[in-house]
Image (cartoon, rainbow, N blue to C red):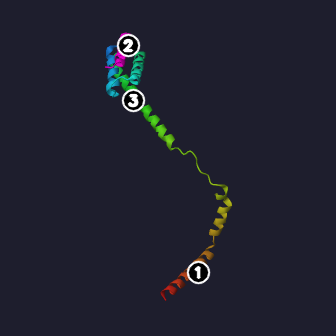
Amino acid sequence: MTNLEQYTVKNLVEKQVLPNAVINVLLHYYLIVQNNAVLESKVANRFTAAAAKLAEEKIQTPEEAMAYMRKANQQATAEKNKRQQTYYAKKRTVIQKETLPDWAKETESDKKDEAKENGLSKEKRAALNAEIDELFAELEKGESK
């Protein structure tokens, strides 16, 4: 047990803010569940803050402490996941969209002109198709010779 751990736990026990069983639940959570080998300064600070929160909530039994720590852990996990999703969403956002210059955009008059060119009468279309067929027939005769 390090000096920091001794000081932190001794301080909580001496103040008698929380019962020893609740302090044991906190120690178990921060050392075993959170997978910390020792209560280093960051962990000790979180441990003390959690003890203060438990005292504020007037938690007196180990069962209440375990339920509270589970709830706090679930909220922290959900918040962490939300932050990660937000980070990745921001990372993938399109910053700038390209716009076409005016000369490259198709105007309404261009569309109407194109429609007029494609809007051949049935007779003209039939005549052109017949001419195309004749040209293909002449081409095939020329190749077969």
Query: Residue 30 vs residue 98: left or right?
Result: left
Q: Nearer the viewer, residue 28 or 54?
A: 28
Q: Is residue 120 on the magenta stretch?
A: no
Give the number of the mark in front: 2 or 1: 2
Height in image: 111 above or below 67?
A: below
Query: What numbered label is drawn on residue 46?
Result: none
Query: What numbered label is drawn on residue 11?
Result: 2
Where on the picture, by quarter, is residue 71?
Answer: top left
Question: Which residue occupies 36% across, 26% down?
Answer: 70
Q: Nearer the viewer, residue 4 or 25?
A: 4
Q: Which residue is mark 3?
A: 74
Query: Residue 133 vs residue 106: left or right?
Result: left
At mark 3, the secondary structure is helix
Q: Amino acid under label 1?
A: Glu
At mark 1, the secondary structure is helix
Circle 3 crowding by C-alpha within 10 Å: few under 14, some 14–19, many from 20 = few
At mark 2, the secondary structure is helix
- Give the percent coordinates (x, y) of residue 82: 45, 35
The CA span between labels 2 and 1 is 103 Å
| Magenta highlight range | 1-15
Q: Which residue is mark 1?
A: 131
The CA span between labels 3 and 2 is 28 Å
Spot the residue most to the right: 109
- Give the percent coordinates (x, y) of residue 34: 35, 28
The mark that comes first in sequence, 3 or 2, is 2
Please tell me how many numbered marks the rendered image carries: 3
Circle 2 crowding by C-alpha within 10 Å: few under 14, some 14–19, many from 20 = few
Question: Which residue occupies 56% across, 82% down?
Answer: 135
Q: Nearer the viewer, residue 103 or 30?
A: 30
Q: Amino acid under label 3?
A: Gln
Query: Residue 79 vs residue 29: left or right?
Result: right
